[in-house]
Image: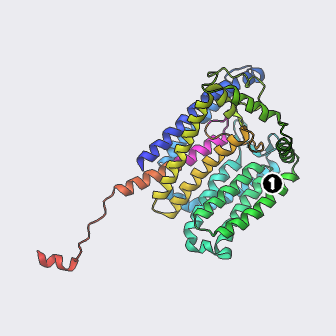
Amino acid sequence: MKKLAVIIFLSSISLMLIGMVLVMSASSAYSEAKFDDVFHLFNSHLFKVGIGIILMIGFAMVPYEIYKNISKPAVFVVAALLLWVLFAGSNLKGAGRWINLGFFSFQPAEAAKLILVMHLAVLIEKKGMMIREYKSGFLYLFIWVILISGLIIMQPNLSNGILLVVISLAVLYVGGARPKHIMISSVLSFLTAGAAVMAFRHSRERILNFSKSLSDGNGVIYQVNQAVLSLGSGGIFGTGLGNSRQSNFFLPEAYGDFIFAILGEELGFLGSILVTVLFILIFCCGILIAKRTKDVFGQMLAFGITFTVVTYFLVNVGVTTGLLPTTGLPLPFISYGGTSIIFLCISVGILLNIALVQSRLESVPEPIVPLHPETSGAAG
């Protein structure tokens, strides 16, 4: 288990180092134009990555069992924050709500992803086989999913809200929920999400533009066109670090949601494969940790964290390559950001602690019990 923890830690650090280089390259032109400082966004990102690494190491030392006692208060606090920003939070780019603290902006939706997975893990362990019953088990857990994801969708932050439902249903399925309950909830969630998408102008335009591009074969989304052009221009080996042309105001959000395109342009196909392999390592090691963990809470928490990281990676790559509608979701560990990378590091720290705790348990030898203890005294 220690080896799995080391692989996850090194893979995460490697991705963040790659991200820092790419953020520097992709944000320099924008930083110079807006802030008259080439390093403005890079310095901000570097500070947040440093905080994230410290938190990752710190949470790796905190016994994960304590989260059983705080998951319910934590989910209520997150719900309260989501409700508060719904009315008083600052809106960013038409989607998502933030708490602006002046020196730092905080997005409660990022915290909600971890807290909800944590609370579902507690409830799955507590309910046991009752999760297979709809009213007394599954429905009680799914109400929490509806509450948190619903508040996120109403911000509106549809992409995060919808993905949270997907991740939660995956955790519930692995936790023992019946497939028919998962299917019914999936269909109802899909219909509700579809209605929500069409209700908000910015998301409706994204879906309609994406559908039009599929039907007529023309790329009507400028940002995606530029991202695909950036990916293709990198070839096998890339143009070299700092040599991206698309980051010079051709590709919007080059240092954020579409940084995978800059990765493909500067580091080429081989660089993209390297990053993909690192995420595969995190996924495989995370699943093995979940499988080898002895308690249900640890199993579900490890699986939920691992599945969340990989799901966001796949969605971001799908958007960058034009396979999915534009969502505005960052590339884990790599995209410029604050709340996202901090809570991602906290999540990985918890995953590392699960592995380390289980490693200590495996190293403790089991007591030798005599086959016939009643005869052991007589034999002496």
Image location of residue 193, percent across then percent down: 79, 57
* Image-based side of 42 in relation to 371, left or right: right
Q: Quadrant of residue 69?
A: bottom right
Hey, which quadrant is residue 256 in on the image? top right
Magenta stretch: residue 288 in it? no
Query: Looking at the image, which is closer to me, 107 or 15?
Result: 15
**Identity, as a three-letter code, of the amino acid under mark 1:** Met
Q: Which image quarter is the C terminus in?
A: bottom left
Residue at the spot 59% in from the left edge and 74% down from the top edge? 130
x then y, percent, for residue 343:
61, 45
Q: Is residue 340 magenta?
A: yes
- Mark 1 lies on residue: 154
Q: Position of residue 235 (x, y in %)?
A: 65, 26
Q: Which structural element holds mark 1?
A: loop
Q: Is residue 9 left or right of residue 167?
A: left
Stretch in magenta: 334-349
Front-lying residue, 300 or 44: 300
Q: Residue drawn at (51%, 64%), measured in percent from left and top?
A: 296
